[in-house]
Image (tube, grey):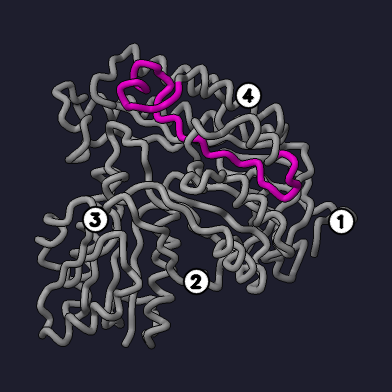
Amino acid sequence: MQCYFFTLGCKVNSCETAGMEAVFQAAGYETVSIPEQADVIVLNTCTVTASGDSRMHTALRKLRACNPNAIMILTGCYAQAYPEAAAALPEADIVIGTQNRAQLPQLVTQFLAEHRKPLQQISPYSGNESFDCLPHHMPTDRTRAFLKIQDGCNCFCSYCIIPYARGRCRSMPLDVLQTEVQKLTAEGYQEVVLCGINLAFYGKEWGGSLLEAVRLCCETKGIQRVRLGSLEPERMTDTLLDALAALPNFCPQFHLSLQSGCDRTLKEMHRRYTAAEYAVLCHAIRKRFPICSITTDLMVGFPGETDADFAESLAFAKKMQFAKIHVFRYSPRSGTPAAQRADQIPDHIKHDRMLAMQQMAESARTIFLQSRVGMTLPVLFERERETAFHNGHTPDFTPVKIPAESHKKSLRKSIFYVRIEKSNPACCFGHIVPDDNANS
């Protein structure tokens, strides 16, 4: 039988889709790239925002329309957070949440044995779950390997549904992590990106820390770079930063979720820091990592956000000189405290605030990329996405292009030092320094 996979949402979802693909392959399935050819279609959902739900509904309808006879599996955060709504979707044959996905081939067998009677298998989280280690699997066309090492969240921010969709914090055991990273090096990967739902809480169950995971990866022979996914600011201590700065193959890219630069809004969001504390952390990072990037998420239109609150958030974000900002509008998530508030912000005001924040973000991005001009930095090259250029990224994830004609052979999975000569609002451009390369 043949299986097609469609993923919405974050890098964690992508990692889990890859794991589900490995599960099906082990059961004798073949992965196909066209949904019309599939016997089974797996849609891995996201429910962080209302737009994520909308994309899920659109994708589900399109996939069902293009292949009416396929077995449609709906899985992921939407199914876990809203099981009744998910089970009521007529296009879905099998609905499973964010647990027990290694059982999917058996559920397909059961579905067929029961004459295609719809199946729902969603277990509520008890708080005592262990980390679910889906099989390691990476697409062959990737240069960097994404590895999910943490799941769940204990924070319960007032706007967020994720603790209900993912359960409590739990982490991949260190011995399992070591085995997984060794597999990646055997497959030729030089860079690993550690990701999780609340990555900074890695190891909390046994009194450990994220540093243990980073250090293990950095010390694995063959790994040239170790990068981190999104981080919550409150667990980024000076001790952790000092230790990370001592690791030569740690990539100084920090995605620190801010959400708002206004203290009143942060408090009502149930965030666990002030804007001033966040600024101190960014200063501490830049002091230890002179060439680094700090990126973030910013929400506009949280319930009760006044014009003055938004102006304060905008001014703070501009002052922080972020390398990149993901701006999004607040959308109510049923079941969260913020969704029950009467002081919701009208959509047209959210829209205007998002445009203003995005304009500032674009300016900050341009300034950041311009700051790299004149530097010579190591670039890990990825697959050639354009005929005219080789494409890659520096340790702080600055995108770099070099002319393809200067190197006829593929540079994929190779690291070379590049002199940055110019930039535009999207990336930097340069040339390889001939006699000074990291590896070839």
Quick one: quadrant of the C terminus?
A: bottom right
Q: Nearer the viewer, mark 4 or mark 3?
A: 3
**Residue 283 circle label:** 4
Neighbour tally class for label 3: few under 14, some 14-19, many 20 plus, Cα within 10 Å: many
Q: Which amino acid lies under the numbered mark 3 shown in the image of this protein?
A: Gln
Label 2, label 1: how many angstroms apart (C-alpha)? Answer: 36 Å
Q: Which residue is mark 2?
A: 137
Residue 237 lies, in percent from the top left, at: 59, 31
Q: Which residues are magenta?
A: 245-273
Q: Which residue is mark 3?
A: 80
Label 4, label 1: how many angstroms apart (C-alpha)? Answer: 35 Å
Question: Vertically, is 19 above or below 350?
Answer: below
Q: Nearer the viewer, mark 4 or mark 1?
A: 4
Mark earlier in primary sequence (4, 3): 3
Q: Are marks 2 and 3 in contact (CB under 8 Å)?
A: no
For image coordinates 57% across by 61% down, the residue present is 177
Label 2, label 4: how many angstroms apart (C-alpha)? Answer: 37 Å
Question: Vertically, is 15 above or below 237?
Answer: below
